[in-house]
Amino acid sequence: MSNQATVPSPSQATSPMTRRRFLAGAGATAISLSVLDSAVVGRAAANEKISLGLIGCGGRGKWITDLFQKHGGYQVVGVFDYFADRANEAGEKFQVPEAQRYSGLSGYKRLLEQKALDAVAIESPPYFHPEQAAAAVEAGKHVYLAKPIAVDVPGCQSIGESGRRATAQKRCFLVDFQTRAHPAYQEAVRRVHQGDIGRLVSGEATYFCSLMFQHMDKEYRKNAGHPEARLRAWAVDRVLSGDVITEQNIHALDVASWILNAEPLRAYGAGGRAREFTGTCWDHFAVIFYYPNDILLSFSSKQVGAGWDDICCRVYGTAGTIDTHYFGEVSVIGDEPFKGGRMVNLYTDGAVNNIATFHKSIMTGDFTNPTVAPSVRSNLTTILGRMAAYQRKEVTWQEMLRANEQFEFDTRGLKA
């Protein structure tokens, strides 16, 4: 197959309803604290366990809920997935009564109506994160949210607003990035911020892996374009996932954003799709990000073929280098060296750390929610890179915000 770089349509399948009206009014309605259940923290403390609902019962949803249970401080009391078979499978696994298993597009709203529910873990396709997170905050629940937080600019802005509202309403809102939760990453980045590698000059971020989501591609082929097929194969659907630069590659770009501690001024990019594939995502990207103080960050990714796999961010300074690998060493090299060690199982260890932090924050009443703003910035960074690559031209941060491009998923034909 030739290396196709066809620019996807902004909407692909556009519906007059879906999220447009929700995002247009996001943050417009303030919620009085007096109408919320102000006893959530007290009830959790009294019961010693936080009652948890799962939104999204796919592979990662069940996997991370198992980690919540292993923590010992949570009790799963409800599950939701659009597909009833998935909700029932998760319900059986976590011993949730049938009456507290919900399905259909609006099933998560019925889950949130449970007064005994303290918190939710949102592990659904990223397209739905903004609306589901906003509804959870409005219902007075603590929110544990998977990355990426959204697929477009309005969605990112909505998550930022939900995080601020959660803080105002004394609720916890945590975004689950594993790297940020690991002590070696934290210490290495702290050393960079205190000046150990001198003035930052340039950097590189990479996300190289082999074929992924083959099972979803097969599912998509069965009835390509049908909304239920797209939902089951969401990771190969550009609108539902945000494309690989947002859904997958954000791991590398989030670390870069964390180290550089700034939003890029502009980006120039390219990319395409080289393999036989039924989905609508690209399988490789190459982007140059221009940061303040003349710092350049080169980014490249591929999810095709076999060979070298690595998720890396490396930033060079006048006195040293920070070198981070999701599956390898984390270190600072130079005048002030630091050997952070080798990442053995960061995917699990980071989630375990975040689950513990979420529990502690709820129990101690820490509602500062420090993961939200950085997540918005890194998510928008991936969108800037995606926009520049699709257009094959330079796009500024402000142009991206002004364009305010919104993805739409046609829900006609789906169960309410």
Image (cartoon, rainbow, N blue to C red):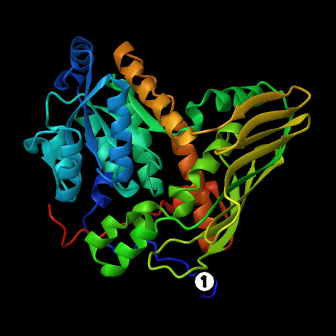
User: What is the quadrant of residue 366 in the picture?
Assistant: top left
Query: In the image as oriented, which residue stretches furthest toward the left?
Result: 99
Query: Where residue 293 sits in the image (x, y, percent)?
Result: 81, 43
Residue that numbered label 1 is attached to: 4
Is residue 46 visible in this depiction of the protein?
Answer: yes
246 vs 255, left or right, is: left
**Quarter of the image containing the C terminus?**
bottom left
- Residue at (55% x, 78% y) in the render: 7
Q: Is residue 362 or residue 131 the one in the foreground?
A: 362
- Residue at (31% x, 65% y) in the render: 231
**Quarter of the image containing the N terminus?**
bottom right
Query: Where residue 316 sits in the image (x, y, percent)?
Result: 84, 43
- Residue at (65% x, 68% y) in the render: 306
59 lies above or below 169: below
Q: Helix, strand, or loop for circle 1? A: loop
- At label 1, the amino acid type is Gln
Q: Residues within 10 Å of mark 1 (few under 14, many from 20)?
A: few
User: What is the quadrant of residue 234 in the picture?
Assistant: bottom left
Query: Where residue 126 sits in the image (x, y, percent)?
Result: 40, 54
Is residue 224 visible in this depiction of the protein?
Answer: no
Q: Is residue 93 or residue 60 the one in the foreground?
A: 93
Query: Where residue 197 sits in the image (x, y, percent)?
Result: 85, 32
- Residue at (87% x, 25% y) in the render: 336
